[in-house]
Image: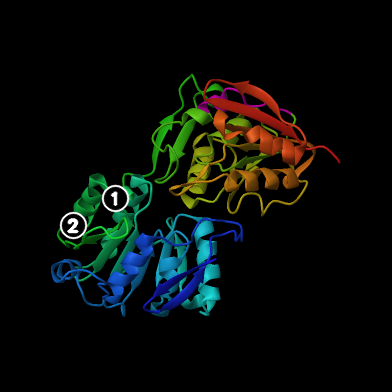
């Protein structure tokens, strides 16, 4: 837990799921910079710099929308203004709920919606935590632009390594004239003035493509990708390698595509075994929407599948799964971490029936075989190349 001090109070913030051993902070210098700007604080800025950044408090009495708040720092600090959080992440939403409650606010003090929900009809203050995915930013700005008016205050924030010319171009093209602040503590603000005459058009997302013949069990499948899904415009090479070495269908009644992304692994498993049911799980709302669209686009019966936005396998009953397919992420936003993979592997062991199997693809250097042997007592290499390895672990009675 770590404390964020703002003009509205000091807040003890955590990520989700909460882990006292987690060294990663639940807020960044970019969050703090934006909150100081909203409060009209200039710190040690020169008079010229203060004038450039707007050295007066922002009126927050209207409809406030916060987009992409990673762990709820912005939303919690502004909870007294009844903001709407628009998030692509189940984990971010849960962290926000916990942080808002810890700060003493009622559960209904903030509204939490997903990137797939309809945005507020009118937005007076739009705050954007710049995401890692430029496509997600593009999609969200397109969706939110109709709710803006000439007087809407639009401020984005991010670390300097996250804000590029392409980022500013999106704000300029979709919202209106855009400029940036000076960098402070390696963070920067983006100021955009809505132009009611600007017709940005509809979002170009979702997009789709057909997997080529070099995609193993996925060859010929249609993949549908919403904005923000990993490798949304092409099949990533790790998944392609995994598709070439998927277990043969026939023995798994219940398959879980864990960290499903666009769902091509689970869809390929469903095609290979017409008797199997598949649960698609991801913490990303766009990923779950993509997986459902992919499953339907390939003519499969939706009654054979469940689509779950959640924290790994926490919502799956113990001992109910025959096969888990997993291509785990090893980044949490800009930070590299093995915590997500460990949580996925541990959840898989709990969810599998005795004799059930976890199949994992990962970069060779990540050493997933060590984690699997510690959890399952076994790990077998199914396939490998110079970059990737496919591993198989079996749940055995102990």
- In 3D space, how far apart are the residues under numbered discs 2 and 1 (Cα atoms)? 13 Å
355 above or below 384? Answer: below
For marks 2 and 1, give the one nearer the viewer: 1
Instruction: Determine the secondary structure under disc 2.
Output: strand
Question: Which residue is tagged 1?
Answer: 163
The x, y position of residue 10, in whole percent, is 45, 76
Name which residue lies at 85% across and 40% down. Answer: 397
Name which residue lies at 82% across and 37% down. Answer: 396
Instruction: Using the image, tell me which numbered label, if any, was put on residue 85.
Output: none
Q: Kindly indicate the quadrant of the structure image that contains residue 31.
A: bottom left
The x, y position of residue 21, in whole percent, is 61, 57
- Image quadrant for the C terminus? top right
Question: Which residue is tagged 2?
Answer: 178
Q: Is residue 390 magenta?
A: no
Within 10 Å of disc 2 (Cα), the crowding (few <14, some 14-19, many 20+) is some
Is residue 9 in view? yes
Q: Nearer the viewer, residue 225 or 82?
A: 82
Q: Nearer the viewer, residue 376 or 297?
A: 376
Tag 2–tag 1 contact (CB < 8 Å) = no
Magenta: main secondary structure equals: loop
Instruction: Left or right? Give the position of 19 relative to 55.
Output: right
- Image quadrant for the N terminus? bottom right
The x, y position of residue 230, in whole percent, is 45, 40
Magenta span? 240-250
**Which residue is at the far front?**
44
Instruction: Left or right? Give the position of 387 relative to 270.
Output: left
Q: Kindly indicate the quadrant of the structure image that contains residue 276.
A: top right
Of the two numbered discs 2 and 1 on the same chain, state the one appearing first in sequence. Answer: 1
């Amino acid at each position: 837990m770590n404390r964020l001090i703002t003009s509205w109070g000091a807040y003890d913030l955590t990520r989700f799921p909460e882990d006292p051993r987690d060294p990663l902070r639940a807020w960044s210098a970019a969050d703090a910079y934006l909150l100081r700007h909203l409060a009209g604080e200039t710190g040690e800025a020169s008079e010229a710099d203060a004038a450039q950044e707007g050295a007066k408090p922002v009126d927050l009495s209207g409809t406030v929308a916060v987009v992409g708040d990673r762990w709820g720092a912005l939303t919690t600090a502004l909870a007294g203004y009844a903001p709407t959080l628009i998030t692509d992440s189940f984990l971010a939403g849960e962290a926000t709920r916990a942080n808002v409650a810890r700060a003493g606010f009622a559960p209904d003090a903030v509204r939490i919606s997903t990137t797939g929900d309809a945005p507020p009809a009118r937005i007076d203050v739009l705050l954007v935590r710049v995401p890692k995915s430029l496509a997600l930013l593009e999609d969200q700005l397109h969706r939110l632009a109709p709710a803006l008016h000439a007087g809407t205050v639009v401020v984005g924030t991010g670390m300097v390594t996250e804000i590029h010319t392409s980022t500013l171009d999106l704000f300029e093209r979709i919202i209106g004239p855009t400029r940036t602040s000076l960098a402070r503590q390696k963070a920067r603000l983006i100021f955009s003035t809505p132009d009611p005459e600007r017709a940005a058009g509809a979002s170009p997302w979702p997009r789709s493509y057909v997997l080529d013949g070099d995609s193993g069990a996925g060859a010929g499948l249609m993949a549908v990708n919403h904005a923000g899904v990993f490798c949304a415009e092409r099949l990533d090479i790790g998944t392609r390698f995994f598709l070439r070495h998927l277990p043969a269908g026939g023995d798994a009644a219940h398959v879980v595509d864990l960290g499903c992304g666009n769902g091509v692994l689970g869809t390929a498993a469903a095609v290979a075994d017409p008797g199997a049911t598949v649960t698609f799980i991801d913490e990303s709302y766009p990923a779950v929407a993509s997986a459902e669209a992919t499953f339907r686009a390939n003519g499969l019966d939706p009654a054979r599948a469940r689509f779950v936005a959640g924290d790994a396998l926490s919502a799956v009953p113990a001992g109910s799964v025959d096969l888990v397919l997993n291509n785990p992420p090893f980044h949490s936003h800009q930070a590299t971490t093995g915590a997500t993979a460990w949580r996925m592997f541990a959840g898989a062991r709990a969810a599998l029936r005795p004799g059930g199997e976890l199949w994992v693809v990962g970069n060779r250097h990540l050493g997933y075989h060590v984690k699997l042997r510690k959890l399952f007592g076994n790990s077998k290499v199914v396939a490998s190349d110079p970059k990737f390895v496919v591993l198989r672990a079996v749940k055995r009675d102990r």
